[in-house]
Amino acid sequence: MNDPRPSAALLAGPPVVRGSMAPTAPVFESARRRGRQVPADSPDPRGHWHRAGVLRRGLLFGLVVAQTILATYFMSGVLPYQGGEPLEVAILALFALLFAWLSAGFWTALAGFAVLLFGDVHAISATARTAGRAKAPVDPAARTALVMPICNESVPRVFAGVQATLASLEATGELEHFDFFVLSDSSDPDARAAEARAWRALCEERGLHGRLFYRWRRYRSKKKAGNVADFCRRWGRAYRYMVVLDADSVMSGECLTALVRLMEANPNAGIIQTAPRSAGRETLYARMQQFAGRVYGPLFTAGLHYWQLGEAHYWGHNAIIRVEPFMRHCALGRLPGRGPLAGEILSHDFVEAALMRRAGWAVWIAYDLPGSHEEMPPNLLEELTRDRRWCHGNLINARLTFARGFHPAHRAVFVTGVMAYLSAPLWFLFLVLSTALLAKHVLVPPTYFVEPRQLFPLWPQWNLAWAVGLLSATAVLLFVPKILAVGLLWARGGEGFGGRARLAASAALEVVLSALLAPVRMLFHTEFVVVALTGLKAVWRSPSREDSETGWGEALARHGSHAAFGLMWGGVAWWLEPSFLLWLSPVVGALILAPAISALTSRASLGRRLRRAGLFVIPEEAAPPPELALVGRLAREGERSERQPGFIEAVVDRELNRTLCAIARTRPGQPQRLRREREALARSACRRGPPSLSARERGMILADGYALACLHHEIWNAPVVHGGWRHGTAALVRIRPATGRKSVPVPDFRITTA
């Protein structure tokens, strides 16, 4: 029996060009400690936008602080003792934090509104035109790798996205400057087999050998960040740029070539992040989220650009990265210490952007660059599963807020990342303390003398007029950005959104559904923060790439306790003061209805019904871009096609086995003892069938080319073969189930990788 030849592995990857990527500086030391600063090695470390950025952020800070001070003053007047008691002091402190958070979002939206109306002289997308590179051919030396890390994903959807992106690139005539890498961390043997066959089939059908590569990583350290770093160490030196994609990412060829031209026109740019647009889902929940992101998202993304300029976010996907400085400066070490906020960095993207900027390289958001797409979670529970991971990762990143050398803008990014989840328990605590204040007012006799030697009594009073005014001001902060976003599209006739009337109706329905979902998210995010801080680990599971729905049983199991809590809370508020329940009803009512909201919004049938009615329509649905139309067609064909291959097919099918043997290879100098163990395992599995192999043994066989070849050879040559292997290929239908009688021998052939 011939071993898989090492040269066959070149089909799965180009020649390795080794490079170093390891933390070379004290990245995570406190800013108070003295030490060597990281050298800024970009062509323009300070950045021509520096002065504008300082002025803009100073304006934002002043607006938020002034607005928060004014609102907190009015809030103190609403309280019965004007903030003179400890409980009221706590309420005022929480109110100030939450109002400042809302205020920052409000002014960001207003800045984005101005940018979308009048443009911005510092927009990164204008630099290619200024440099004369807007339509210039891509420099042949600007080799770019498209890198897609995956882990136990839906294989048809992943390779539909790969094919659509490559087809769009081919249409631009610039495909020769790009290579595509699918980097698998999949642990499921069936998924690995399906990935290998899909990769080989796509290479053969589209003639992409030497252009589309596939690598499965044996040692899966540091999750996605580790997978990208592994690519950089192996092949990073062969490429000037890389575009990092998610498993659900689709990018047009025009967008990808534009990103390369922007990098060429801005030699000091380290990362350029696009603003992905969500599309492709059909559930009510996902279509509502797609609509909200498409209508309100551009406003906030343009606003982020206005404040951040070259010190922007990086969201970990649909972004182009300059490989050399990324390898030199963005390797992630472990955070020192013990406890839940130590060890491996989970939310790597914010940290990598901060490290890139610390070395003098700019990070930009190309907020107005079209052709970048992603998908939303199909239902609330899938979104919350993702949020649990992000919550833990952002809490860990909070430790880096005062790390040495980071730019103030990226310290603010770490703070906003934490506040995105910490605001939920703060809001919950604010509501609980407000209820406690009411209980004290109703059940405990009032205190008229609250300070020593007080001459005159302090009469408790509730200023209802100020309360209504403050509530109105808060509503302005929440709803004016949405009104402005809808107004921009209204002025254009609502094109792509079903027309003006349907655009307005969709926005109104989105406001109602978002108000119902907000208290549910509040309790879940509060739980996530508590769990993360107490040291319980989050489960990093890939989100569903299909329109999965939430059953009533699952909805009751996940939301039942919240509904019971809402009933109890509302009952207490009614018992204390019936009028207070009116103020609290949007929160407790949403919690009581949470199981129904979660189950109903996950229904694809409701999403399709609303689409037929013209609600939650987005341009990507009304007139799908070619790349999204191709993804949809290929994904539907994949769903209708035959069952995806699995471990059995990987062992039995000749072509698939040959492919996986070439990918897995065999370690040179493998000990004879280990080879004998592999051969014994193959003989045993051949007789006893697939059920005799544990998940660990299946994974080991797929990871070892010699073991996989042994088992394949044994099945095709042994006189007795377990019937469980007959599902692997039509050629084995003559194998009878094991009944104590000898099975009919199958034709003999030797395994080769030629």
Image (cartoon, grey):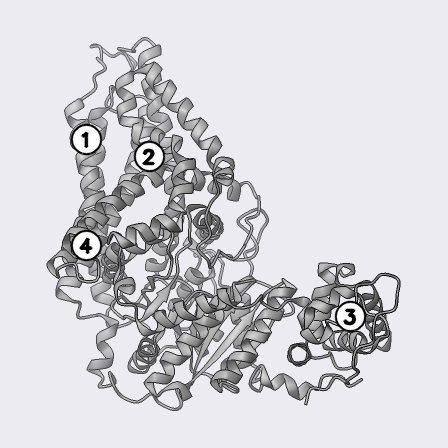
Q: Is residue 93 above or below residue 402?
A: above
- The amino acid beneath tag 2 is Leu
Q: Amino acid at mark 3?
A: Ile
Classify mark 1: helix, strand or loop: helix
Q: State the CA–CA distance, disc 2 to disc 3.
A: 71 Å
Nearer the observer, 640 or 312: 640
Residue that label 3 marks: 735
Q: Eyeballing the image, is 565 above or below 631?
A: above
Hey, which quadrant is residue 100 in on the image? Answer: top left
Residue 98: x and y in percent read 30, 39
Image quarter where the C terminus lies is bottom right
Residue drawn at x 79%, y 83% is 748
Give the mark, 1 or 3, whose residue is nearer the N terminus: 1
Residue 393 is left or right of residue 536, and the answer is left
Say which mark, if any, is on residue 94: 2
Whichever of callouts 4 and 3 sits on the residue coming sooner in the sequence is 4
Q: Is there CB contact under 8 Å for labels 2 and 3?
A: no
| Mark 4 / mark 1, whichever is N-terminal | 1
